[in-house]
Image: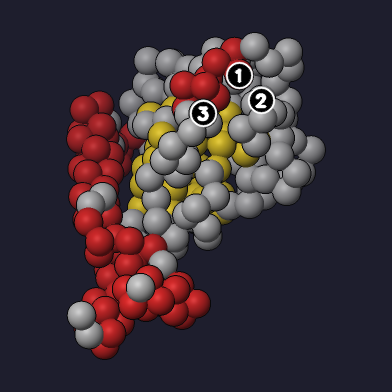
Amino acid sequence: MHFSTIFAASAMASAAMAAEHVVSVGDKSGSIVFKPDSIQAAQGDTVVFHFWPKNHSVVQSTFANPCQPMANGMWSGFVPTSDAEKAASTSFTFEVKNASAPVWFYCSQGKHCQGGMVGVINPPASGANTIDAFKKAAAAASDNVSPTSQAGTGGKLSENSTATSGSGSSATQSGSGSMASMSGMSSASGAPQSTGAASQLGGSVAFAGLTGLFTFFML
Ligand SMILES: [Cu+2]
């Protein structure tokens, strides 16, 4: 295999592969869930949280201490909304800077964390730290704690201008249309980054990473 070929493939992959993963925080029927609750994301990908009724949050924790904020972890703040026809105009975007570091998170409203409203970005591929084990530990947590840091820490709060312009603009946003467009987005972004060596190359595109790859191929 030629190194220059690897380099070119990797460089192209990095430009094309930055995917956006959409996660629903709650849903239109008021469920206490993240959908999906386990996300595979490459370095440079973003995870965009869309909030549904009534009043949820996204907080990063560690695996060992569910329902408690991790120091300097992400924190969306609470995003209240009563509109069951579309997600809140405010969304929260987290960028994956290190795909090999799992990001465990939960909702700090009421006892939502204990109730199973937890999730993870890039869970370990093997071992005991699974989303199911995290849920089980969360269910047994005594408290559910919100961070004291500023809302938006560790990510970016955004306002979707099309969602704030009132009911007149809701033709493409309402009802099943909204869900369809959301699932369309996630499948469109999910498809290219899910399989094969190309995504591995894309995820480790830094020069240091390439050096490691070359070493790997030479062994
Ligand atoms: Cu919640």
The residue that appears at 40% across and 76% down in the rendered structure is 215
Could you give the CA–CA distance between mark 1 and mark 3, rounded to whole angstroms? 15 Å
Amino acid under label 3?
Ala
Q: Earlier in the sequence, mark 1 or mark 3?
A: 3
Q: Quadrant of the N terminus?
A: bottom left
Farthest residue toward the bottom? Answer: 4
In this rendering, is residue 93 above or below 88? below
Residue in the foreground of this view, choosing between 176 and 209: 209
Q: Is residue 76 visible?
A: yes
Residue in the foreground of this view, choosing between 146 and 67: 67
Residue 138 disc label:
1
Residue 18: percent from left, percent from top:
35, 62
The mark lying in front, picked from 1 and 3, is 3
Residue 128 disc label:
3
Reading the image, the residue beneath label 2 is 67
Tags 1 and 3 touching, CB below 8 Å: no
